[in-house]
Image (cartoon, helix red, strand yellow):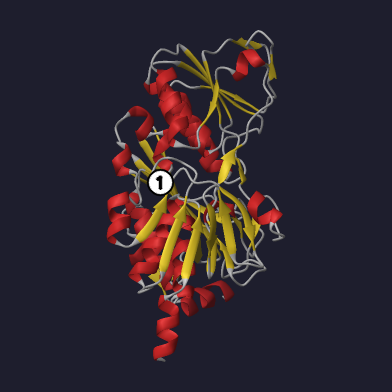
Amino acid sequence: MADMKRDKSMETVVIVGAGQAGAALAVSLREFGFAGAIEILGNEAHPPYERPELSKGYVTETVGFDALVALDPEKAKELDISLRLSCDVLEIDRVGSRVRTAAGWIGYDHLILATGGQARRLPLPEALAQKAFAIRTRDDADAIRARLTDAASVVVIGGGWLGTEAAVTARSFGAKVDLIETAPRLCARVAPVWLSERLAEIQTEAGVTLHLGEVPSFGEDGSIQIGETRLMPDLVIEAIGMTAHDRLAREAGLECADGIVVDAQNQTGDPKIYAIGDCARGADGMRRESWQYANQSAQNVAAQLTAQPRQKPEPRWFWSVQGKSRVQMLGDCPEGATQFLRRAGKGESCLFLSGATLVGCIAIDNPRDIAEARKVMSSRQALDLDLISDPKIPLSKALVDAREVLANYQT
């Protein structure tokens, strides 16, 4: 046992990617007792930071960068974590268990790819490309803020979470804002119709002009034609999704599909290499670009490397701040589920049930229902369908014995 412990303390974990997931992994390893060397290699000049506020509080300067930092250099030094910034990894040598940077080779016992992704961009004419920006990094957000201070007209292309957040943020600077989404509704890929309609109302109330279900054309003069409307924006924000940074993995011979393919343990086809966060495509074939998954996948890999118990699986959770409204989604919210609406004051929520079992909840300015839904879903108990229609009754007080509910259905 002594030899095993000594060997373990001499292992090296190399983390490629100095974002939220990479930082969470390094910190978790230390929390779980890993005593070996930890190297974080990041290509940005900034210390690891969380991205969700970039399109909201950071651009409006209501949230400072320090509040976003997930691992500052001082904390890294305290935890004996080597944090190498402005450091590009050029290749992976799987046979030699090492990675190459401009400064030379670094060996590893375990390699974790937390490379994230890059914003998709449109092939715009030069006159538009010069005033078009994406939001993926701190530098992107800084550039957009600088342009928003004197932009009279802004066009946001993309009606997903990032696009809707950016549109409301741009409106707060006083600009005229048009949001273009080629799908017939907002967030159509991830949201049920009820939520898409509420998001459209929030956008309209904020003063954003929506163009849904139309394909724009881009003029050489810097204009955008959408239907019968011609726009001449001062700033264009592209929010059309991201592609995974999987080049290193592909060139190393690992399976990739717009993301690094991993199993349920976030392990690639190479037992020494894992992928976490936005760049990982899971065993279910999906990539999960969320704050929650970045942390969960990091903690799960850290637990495996230190022989600690994995965390219990949690329902998927996501949030978005849309101007003054906070939208939270928990679990699965399929269109075909039975839906119950609950309104409490200015807040509201929509419950998604399979039979009498709660499978998901969406809440807008209603944090109590999200907290209660989490309890109910963890309990795996059935709900009284009459009681849940009353928003004054907490969901955890509407639980009933599942056998009783089934008996009622049968009669």
- Depth check: give the residue in front, 291 or 103: 103
The percent coordinates of residue 27 (x first, y second) are 36, 62
The percent coordinates of residue 212 (x first, y second) are 62, 27
The percent coordinates of residue 380 (x first, y second) are 46, 72
Residue indicated by mark 1: 50
The picture quadrant where one finds residue 295 is bottom left
What element does badge 1 sit on? loop
Q: Is residue 31 above or below residue 210?
A: below
Q: How many marks?
A: 1
Number of residues whose C-alpha sits closer than 10 Å to that of mark 1, classed few (under 14), some (14–19) or many (20 or more): many
> Which residue is pictured at 65% across the width and 32% down the height?
184
- Depth check: give the residue in front, 389 or 359: 359
The percent coordinates of residue 16 (x first, y second) are 52, 55
The picture quadrant where one finds residue 284 is bottom right
Q: Look at the image and tell me whether residue 313 can be seen.
A: no
* Residue farthest along the front direction in this orientation: 104
Image quarter of the N terminus: bottom left
Q: Is residue 144 above or below residue 65?
A: above
Q: Look at the image and tell me whether residue 116 can be seen.
A: yes
